[in-house]
Image (cartoon, rainbow, N blue to C red):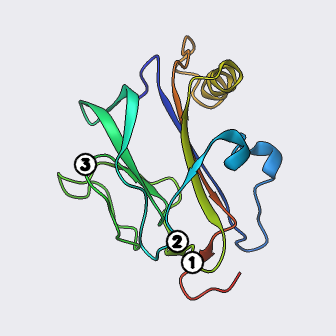
Amino acid sequence: VLAGWAVLVALGEWLWAGAEVPLGDFYPFGPAQGDAATRKQDDGGSELRPLSIPFPFFGAGHTGLYVNNNGIISFLKEVSQFTPVAFPISKDRRVVAAFWADVDNRRAGEIYYRESTEQPILERASRDIAQYFPEFPGFSAQWVFIATWYRVTFFGGSS
């Protein structure tokens, strides 16, 4: 459910059956943007990342989240599970399944993330929501969390 002030943006570049998302479609990411990166660990992820503005999800205002290497953002605890399962999961797993796959960033790729209140990012997010969710015509982002799975490989992959 979208509130009038927050949006999560999760992007991934993954070669799959010849399909690749052009980097121009990504929100700016990487160390030059001030992003943090998750640990190089199979089935790992970030520590609890505090949020400056609570994110409304599953009827609660979440004040922190985890960026999990396997392509999900979770709110109550880290999730190392790499096999997607049908929703709803369990009551203690509130997740956004942005890119759920068996990712192994020890061999290739990076998982970057950051919170942003930069005006150009907020304006772009607001335009994107208006384009892809026309049922929210007055949406105006006040906060964005960007997570990017960049050139990651699958478990057992080499590049």
Mark 2 secondary-structure assignment? loop
Q: Outermost residue, top direction?
A: 138
Structural crowding at the residue carrying mark 2, measured as other residues with C-alpha within 10 Å and reported as few (<14), some (14–19) or many (≥20): some
Report if the CB atoms under discs 2 and 1 are less than 8 Å apart: yes
- Label 3 and label 2: CA atoms lie apart by 22 Å
Of badges 1 and 3, the one in the foreground is 1
Residue tagged 1:
106
Which residue is painted at 55% across and 41% down in the image? 114
Q: Position of residue 137 (x, y in %)?
A: 57, 14
Report if the CB atoms under discs 3 and 2 are less than 8 Å apart: no
Task: Give the mark, 1 or 3, whose residue is nearer the N terminus.
Answer: 3
Of badges 3 and 2, the one in the foreground is 2
Q: Image check: 3 left or right of 15?
A: left
Q: Position of residue 117 (x, y in %)?
A: 57, 23
Let me know if residue 30 appears in the view.
no
Q: Is residue 38 above or below residue 29?
A: below
Q: Amino acid at mark 2?
A: Lys
Q: Amino acid at mark 3?
A: Leu
Q: Is residue 157 above or below residue 18?
A: below
| Rendering quarter of residue 132 | top right
- Label 2 and label 1: CA atoms lie apart by 5 Å
Report if the CB atoms under discs 1 and 3 are less than 8 Å apart: no
Residue tagged 2:
40
Closest to the observer, 138 or 142: 142
Residue tagged 3:
76
